[in-house]
Image: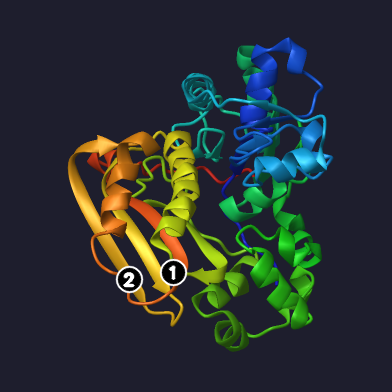
Amino acid sequence: MELQPPFRKIIHVDMDAFYASVAQLDNPELRGKAIAVGGNEIRGVVSAASYEARKFGVKSAMSGFMAKKKCPHLIFVKSDFERYKELSAKIREIFYEYTDLVEPLSLDEAYLDVTENKKGNTSANDIAREIRARIFEVTGLRASAGISINKFIAKVASDINKPNGQKTVHPEEVIKFLEELPVNKFYGVGKVTAAKMYNLGIFVGNDLKKKSLEELVTLFGKSGTHYYNIVRGIHNSAVKPNRIRKSLAAERTFNENISSEIYMIEKLEKIADELERRMLKNDTKGKTITLKIKYSDFTQQTRSKTKPHFMQTKKEFFPVVKELLFQDKLVNSVRLLGLSFGNLNTEIKEPVWVQLKFDFNTHRF
């Protein structure tokens, strides 16, 4: 099956090891060294790692203790979200020089629809190269990019030539690219799903393509329809310039069920650290905090509290979390705890939907 035009021209720009690169930018003594942002060798969690540290297996969400064990010469540095936001704003201004159809995913990545753009450039590949050069010129930071006909393929492609590279998947190359792509490289397929696919003999896109829609839905539920479409190059999600996040969450499933509320506080401290990191990374604040409890018998309970003011940091919201935990007696031992924020400041913004008419006479990427 061949995909038929017209095709959109989508770029996914992803900063290279953004937090770690900012630390190395601001402190020349850290350049070329293995560094971790956040945590330390005793406790805490790594938020980001430089490429020099990644070579030793250090990655985000890893405990500082484990990171130091893997890389004994690792240097820990503190997060600086004000600096990240400052640089992110400069990067977004560069995006808007080319198109108003920009969908930020976080401080360090975004989708751009350049099917029609302010430069009148018909080559999305050239635009991506220009944008990456402009980012380096303005900020001193490196970025990678993926370019293709939809967001899914662009996102996958941006990871292929990292760091400081780009990959274009042309319309005529899409099907072959997806057929040969290992399933664990499909954006949205995590370790658990990939393992399930391997057990079913699904290792690359072409294996996935051999499964019928009915089979995939039976095996993977609603996600089955998604897998059926994406492996055929079908992903019609538009770049949304005013994507509004309605909630933000972090949770953890435990290897062993726990029943001590004191021990749960300890676990919730770590989950709160992660939630704070995500809130700061996305420049988000919320008024409603929800505690999610999943018991050993798989029954689930949520407890929420709404404050009159916005909260963002752990210092602000963790006292509420403790209130919620001790609000009622636990009915069983617990296998999962989670925290989420609702009533976000992002919901205040009114979305403005931009509909443009595109000239599809040229398909040059």
Three-letter amino acid code at the position of disc 2: Leu
Q: Are dots 1 and 2 in contact, CB under 8 Å? A: yes
Mark sitting on residue 330: 2
Would you place residue 109 above or below residue 224 in this image?
A: above
Q: Secondary structure at mark 2?
A: loop
Residue 100: x, y in percent?
44, 32
Where in the figure is residue 254, as x and y percent of width and height?
55, 66
Mark 2: give few (<14), some (14-19) or many (20+) Cα within 10 Å. some
Q: Position of residue 129 (x, y in %)?
A: 70, 28
Q: Nearer the viewer, residue 327 or 36?
A: 327
Left or right placement of residue 162 versus residue 115 in this view = right
Given the image, on which type of amino acid does mark 1 rest? Answer: Ser
Quarter of the view holding residue 51: top right
Q: Can residue 42 be seen by looking at this rendering?
A: yes
Q: Which residue is mark 1?
A: 259
Q: How many marks?
A: 2
Q: Secondary structure at mark 1?
A: loop
In three-dimensional space, the C-alpha distance between marks 1 and 2, rounded to whole angstroms, equals 8 Å
Q: Residue at x 58, y 40 (%)?
A: 44
Quadrant including the C terminus = top right
Which residue is at the front of the view, 233 or 183? 183
Residue 179, quarter of the rendered image? bottom right
Residue at the (62%, 62%) spot, across then down: 4
The residue shown at (49%, 76%) is: 222
Label 1 CA crowd tier, 10 Å (few <14, some 14–19, many 20+): some
